[in-house]
Amino acid sequence: MKTIRRRYDLAGKTAFITGAARGIGEHTARRLYAKGANVSLVGVEPQLLAELAEELGPRAVYFHADVTNTEALREAAEGTASRFGGIDVVVANAGIAPPTTTIAAVDPTAFERTLEVNLLGVWRTVHATLPYVIERRGHITLIASIYAFFNGVLNASYAMSKAAVEQFGRALRVELADSGATAGTVYFGFVDTDMVDHAFAQPAAAALRSALPAFLTKPIPLAHAVDALVVGIERRQARVTAPRWVGPALLGRGPTMLFDDYLRRSNKIQDAVDVATGGDSGRR
């Protein structure tokens, strides 16, 4: 088994980033470019991607590709390798937030769309890029969440997707052990992005936040999240966590299962469920 201890120098490497038009994807692209990497910007907002690529400069290229489209991702990976000679780093970042509501009330199409993008989109991204990464002994970063191990009340599809991404990343890292390539999983709390702002604007989400300790739901600055992510790539870390409390919570996930009982018994949590269901949670 090959063990890599030296810092992974990003200068001259090529990074393939999904969900690159905004938020974590955009700012990761900026940071990697500043470190001398070529960046391939992949996403569903071609105008924003084109503007970002032009702003960054000649070592940036963009591809209009939805992670639900296997062929589009394959073409983006081939185009990236053709332009820059290969792919060294993958950041499987594209994701969406579902409506904050119950399993009983959620629109099945919205529920399945979340899994399609957040889980199968990660699988498709890895499948399209993995041969290139193995060839270059590179690194793959999968964006999971604290929802990989926290209870997903009112966000079940999101939690399902992130828990599955975690398991995918763990398996991938082990399977790559003899190849010289590596993989890591990112566990972020809430990050100050447009997606989080939109999610928190929903009445049920506001009610849920009021029922939880403030430190759990306080968004961290986007720059802090990207700092952790980039360091994780440079160190080829198996796990990247932010903010600080996430690491200990991840390691102590056994006791965190007790949190389910707290959530089940909490009147405030059930009030949030009532908000999501229009006052019909089934309580008596």
Image: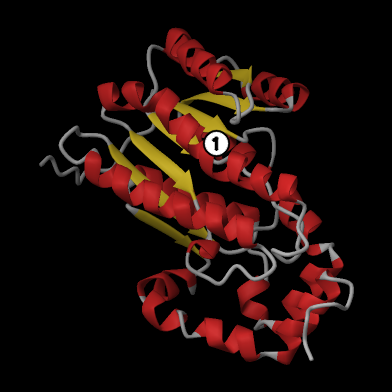
Above or below — where is 73 with respect to 150?
above
Which quadrant: the C terminus? bottom right
Residue at image point 57% right, 60% down: 159
Residue at x-position 64% and y-position 71%: 153
Q: Residue 242 location in percent, x, y? A: 50, 63
Q: Nearer the viewer, residue 221 or 111?
A: 111
Residue 92 in view (yes/no): no
Q: Is residue 184 above or below residue 152?
A: above
Q: Quadrant of residue 210?
A: bottom right
Number of numbered discs on residues: 1
**Label 1 environment density (alpha carbons within 10 Å; few <14, some 14–19, many ≥20):** many
Q: Position of residue 172 (x, y in %)?
A: 31, 42
| Residue that carries the numbered disc 1 in the rendered image | 121
Measured as percent of width and height from the top left, residue 218 is found at: 67, 71
Q: Nearer the viewer, residue 33 or 99?
A: 99
| Local SS, label 1 | helix
Q: Position of residue 147 (x, y in %)?
A: 55, 63
* Quadrant showing the N terminus: top left
> In screen coordinates, is 256 left or right of 280?
left
Instruction: Specify the farthest residue to the top.
Output: 82
Residue extending furthest toward the left: 1
Residue 55 can be seen in this image? yes
Query: Callout 1, which amino acid?
Result: Gly
